[in-house]
Structure formats: C-alpha cells, structure tokens
Image (tube, grey):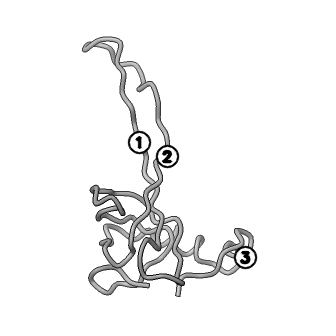
C-alpha cells in the first residue's frame, strides 16, 4: 500500500490528508488493511479540548484524548517517517503479538 506520491506506507508514519468525511487530519498511521482499496487505514491523533478558567489562567487543558480517523491510504501524504517507531511496529514479532498482518 502506498501514499499519494507512491511512498510505501508503514505503520507508525506521521501522515496528513483527509479522512473519509473529507476533513483535514494530521496524525499517526496505526492500522492498515491491505485487503481493500478504500477506507483502508486508521490515523490516530491527539485531540485537545481546552476549557480555561480565565484568559490569564495557565492551567492544563480540561481533556486530552486520542481521536481516531479512518482514511484511504492512497489519499494520504507522508509527513514524517519515524524509522524507530516504524521498524518496531512493522516487525513480525510486534505484528504477530497484535494479531495483524504486515502492510503489503
């Protein structure tokens, strides 16, 4: 499976593009399904919901969560490849432990 520019997709890549709802996304490719051509990837990103007590407050945001977006890998662009993460997450041992097949 490949991104828009033909670069091979790896789990752990930082990607940008649009999700299946056509909203702009920027996150980490965490799942890929080589068995289909559309809606074949999951991108996780941090979602920060701020609710400051006042404008001058420097307290932590009220909530930080991981948001999950589904996308077609061929519509995404590689933003940054973290070789250390990609190597770990695409290793046969990690994939076998997670119960998934490697990205073809």
Position of residue 102 measured from the top left corner of the image (x, y, whole percent): 60, 82
- The earlier-in-sequence mark between 3 and 2 is 2
Which quadrant: the N terminus?
A: bottom left
User: Can you tell which mark lies on residue 96?
Assistant: 3
- x, y percentage for residue 20? 36, 63
Q: Residue at x 43, y 52 (%)?
A: 45
Residue at mark 2 = 66
Looking at the image, residue 4 sits to the left or right of residue 11; the answer is left
Q: Residue at x 43, y 46 (%)?
A: 46
- Give the image quarter of residue 23: bottom left
Give the x, y percent position of residue 11. 51, 71
Instruction: For the residues labelled 2 and 1, say whether their Cβ atoms are less than 8 Å apart.
Output: yes
User: What residue sits 35% from the left and 12% below the top?
Assistant: 53
In-front residue for pair 21/79 = 21
Q: Is residue 94 left or right of residue 39?
A: right
Residue at disc 3, secondary structure: helix
* Mark 3 to mark 2 CA distance (whole Å): 24 Å
Secondary structure beneath label 2: strand
């Amino acid at each position: 499976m490949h991104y828009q520019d033909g670069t091979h997709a790896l789990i752990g890549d930082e990607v940008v593009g649009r999700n299946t709802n056509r909203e702009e996304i920027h996150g980490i490719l965490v799942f890929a399904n080589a068995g289909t051509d559309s809606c074949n990837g999951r991108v996780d990103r941090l979602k920060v919901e701020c609710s400051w007590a006042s404008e001058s407050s420097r307290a932590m945001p009220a909530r930080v969560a991981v948001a999950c977006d589904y996308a077609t890998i061929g519509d995404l662009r590689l933003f940054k490849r973290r070789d250390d993460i990609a190597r770990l997450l695409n290793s046969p041992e990690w994939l076998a432990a997670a119960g998934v097949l490697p990205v073809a």
